[in-house]
Amino acid sequence: MSRTQLSIPVGLLVENVLTSGVPGDVIIEWLQRRDFSRLLPLVKESAMDFDERLQTADDIGDDWEKAIRHGYEFKFLHINGLKRLLDFRFDRKVDRDYVQDELSLKHIQLTTEEIELLQSLIGRQWIVQEETEQAEEGRTDRELSSSIPVRIQLKFP
């Protein structure tokens, strides 16, 4: 079975609603009813226009419900979308948790499971590679022992 593919606006909607911690079936019910009142206080980015993004999904045929239930991958993802994804899904921010070098992101500390998940979301266009040098500044021993420094770069620059 092929993975559901989502556009950037719809994929970031999915990521944002998942930050709420609410079970997927409940999220789907609320979004179907266009009842955002209980969801907005719980998500990371409450200013996001859920209604507009759901309309975009309807207009272009992005199956956000299937994506919430079974996972997805981005059709295309630019560097700023990638940075937003890292913030939503892994709470990693540029200049705090990693650095941007043109169209690459470096020194991102992720666990093996996070690396696999990230690669499944962005693998059509981006490569997640383990770095040989660790960016240890500001990290505790516990964080270093459970995480791997990675670099994300375009497959075809």
Image: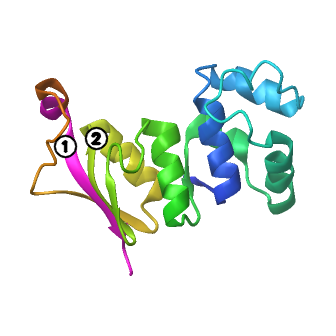
Residue type beneath disc 2: Leu
State the image coordinates of residue 72 (x, y, percent, origin top left).
56, 49
Query: Which residue is at the front of the view, 83 or 157?
Result: 83
Q: Residue at x 72, y 26 (%)?
A: 27
Query: Which residue is at the front of the view, 29 or 106?
Result: 106
Q: Does the stretch in magenta take in 81? A: no
Q: Residue at x 40, y 48 (%)?
A: 118
Q: Residue at x 79, y 53 (%)?
A: 57
Indicate the quadrant where residue 113 lies. top left
Q: Residues within 10 Å of mark 1 (few under 14, many from 20)?
A: many
Q: Which residue is mark 1?
A: 148
Residue type beneath disc 1: Ile
Q: Does the stretch in magenta take in 147? A: yes
Indicate the quadrant where residue 62 lies. bottom right
Q: How is the image coloured?
A: rainbow
Q: Residue furthest bottom?
A: 157
Q: How many angstroms separate mark 1 from mark 2 (CA)?
A: 5 Å
- In the figure, is residue 112 to the left or right of 38? left
When the figure is inspected, residue 102 is found, relative to residue 123, above or below; the finding is: below
Q: Residues within 10 Å of mark 2 (few under 14, many from 20)?
A: many
Helix, strand or loop for disc 1? strand
- In the figure, is residue 77 to the left or right of 100? right
Q: Is residue 2 visible?
A: no
Query: Which residue is at the front of the view, 75 or 144?
Result: 144
Q: Which residue is mark 2?
A: 110
Which range is magenta? 144-157
Q: Residue at x 81, y 32 (%)?
A: 31
When the figure is inspected, residue 157 is found, relative to residue 65, above or below; the finding is: below
